[in-house]
Structures are given as C-alpha cells and as structure tokens.
Image (cartoon, grey):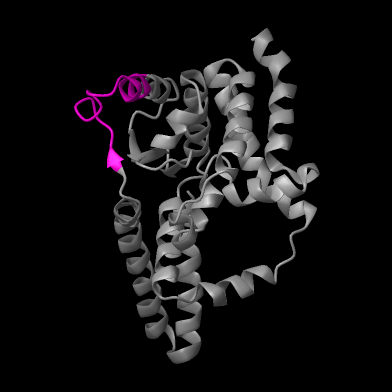
Amino acid sequence: MPFVKVNLSAVVLFGTLGYFIAGPVCAAVMGAASLGILLIWQLVATQLVFNALKAKLMTDASVRSSVIHRLFLGDANALRDSAGLKATRFYMIDTHVPLAFSMGASTGSSYIVVTSGLFKTLTRLEVSAVIGHELGHIKAGDSALNAMRLSLSLFISALRIRPIVSVFSNMFPRTTLIANLLLKPECRADAFSATLCKDAKILASALKKLERGVRAVQWSALDTVPFLANVAVVDPFAAQESYDRPEQSKTAYRVAELYRLEPESKAA
C-alpha cells in the first residue's frame, strides 16, 4: 500500500507538471515515465543496499559452521512463521555495530538484516525480541519503502550533495508533535514483539543494551547511508544525543511503554 501511494503521488505530480508544460500528451508521457522509473527503482533498490553494505544471505548451509548463527536462524524462522511472514529472509552484515533493520512488505518478499555485533551485545532471547520488532514493522507496512530510502541515501552520498540536503532538512523544526509521530511506529513494533515473544521485558532489556552499544562504536557506513540510523531498532544518532540529554531519550520512552504492557502480556 505505501508503494502504491508513492506511485499514485508521482503520477499525479508529474502528470500535472506535464499538463502545464505541454498539455495532455506530455502529462501522459511524464506520468508514465515517473511510474516506470519508480518500478525500476523498487526492483533494484534492495540489491543496491545489500551490495553497498556487503550483506550476506543466511541459509542453513551458510550458518552451519556457527552454533550461534544456526540457533539464530532457527529462532528467526520460527518467529517469522508465527507472524505469518514466511517470505521473509535474513541477511547479516559483518560489523561490530549492534544493529538490525528491515526492508519489504508483508504482501511480498521482505528482508531483515542483522549485524554480527548484535550477537555479541544481546542474549539469544533478546535477539529474538529484536527480530519480533522488525517483523512488526514489516507486518504494519513500515518497512515497505526502506530499500528505496536507503538507496536514495546512497545516491545522495555518491553525488556528494549531502551537505546541501542536510541544510534543507535542518530547516524543519523538530517539534514534540513530530517526535511523537515518529515514535508511534516504533512503539507499535515493540508491542508486536512483546505479543509474539510473550514477554515485554526481554525487548526492553535489548533496547537498553543496544542504546549503550551503538553509543560506543563508530561505523563508516553511517556516513554514506545516514538514513540507516533511522530504520535501525535503535537510532545511533538519537542514542548519542540522549547521552547528553537523557530526559529526551526515545529508547527510555519505548522501554517505559513496554513495561506498561507487561501486566497485559502476563495476563494473556
């Protein structure tokens, strides 16, 4: 559904622009061209991201030599099946930064990417809770456009126009209302994980560990793909800001919401 909305918006926008430039024929051509570009972009975006981040598909054969990865894949596949998202596949990036994010929609192929650092930071149950969180994003449609957003971030970095883009993005005020709207999908995915894993405290523990973990490390990929921070379970940039202003910690808010869910999850 999000991709359909993007397609319709692009067709209307460029079709209207074409109409004012040269009439209905130009409107039809520009509308169709915008739709074609978006369709091609959607097809190649995921692979562009995987190539840029050097992500590797996790299969029974590829994880055979690692007990930790083998257990993870078994747990993740079981959660995926319980969530009704059997088309979801799992990829891993070899880096010490503890991150996880998702791409794709519940109606088609979807992907969850984890880093090797995630296994060094969290327990087995906590990693499963993080996977539940990402499955919640996929189920709700939050991840449908992530591959396109991440590939756009790569494109902006390749053109070396990120400073210009940053100037424009910094012009928009960061109000409490906007912050609360951005947190809603995260809290919704947290609640989905708590229900799927039947314990809200596990994800709460994972979030606190991840916030500490992403503060302590640097990852060069965040310089070229800064949007990656926005789609990660815990935003590294926000985690760093919360160190100086703990009262504004997004993770603390999410943890509090999870503890609020705990009596309900126990009763169930």
Region rendered in magenta: 56-74
Farthest-out residue, bottom: 22
Left or right, residue 220 beside residue 249: left
Q: Is residue 63 magenta?
A: yes
Is residue 104 in view from this perspective? Answer: no
Q: Nearer the viewer, residue 2 or 59?
A: 59
| Residue at 29% across, 54% down | 51
Q: Nearer the viewer, residue 116 or 197?
A: 116
Residue 185 higher or lower than 262, as above or below: below
| Residue at 35% across, 54% down | 49
Q: Position of residue 127 (x, y in %)?
A: 48, 26
Residue 164 higher or lower than 182, as above or below: below
Left or right, residue 79 beside residue 254: left
| Residue at 44% across, 62% down | 224
Residue 50 higher or lower than 83, as above or below: below
Q: Position of residue 1 (x, y in %)?
A: 47, 48
Quadrant hosting residue 268: top right
Residue 147 higher or lower than 185, as above or below: below
Q: Nearer the viewer, residue 209 or 126?
A: 209
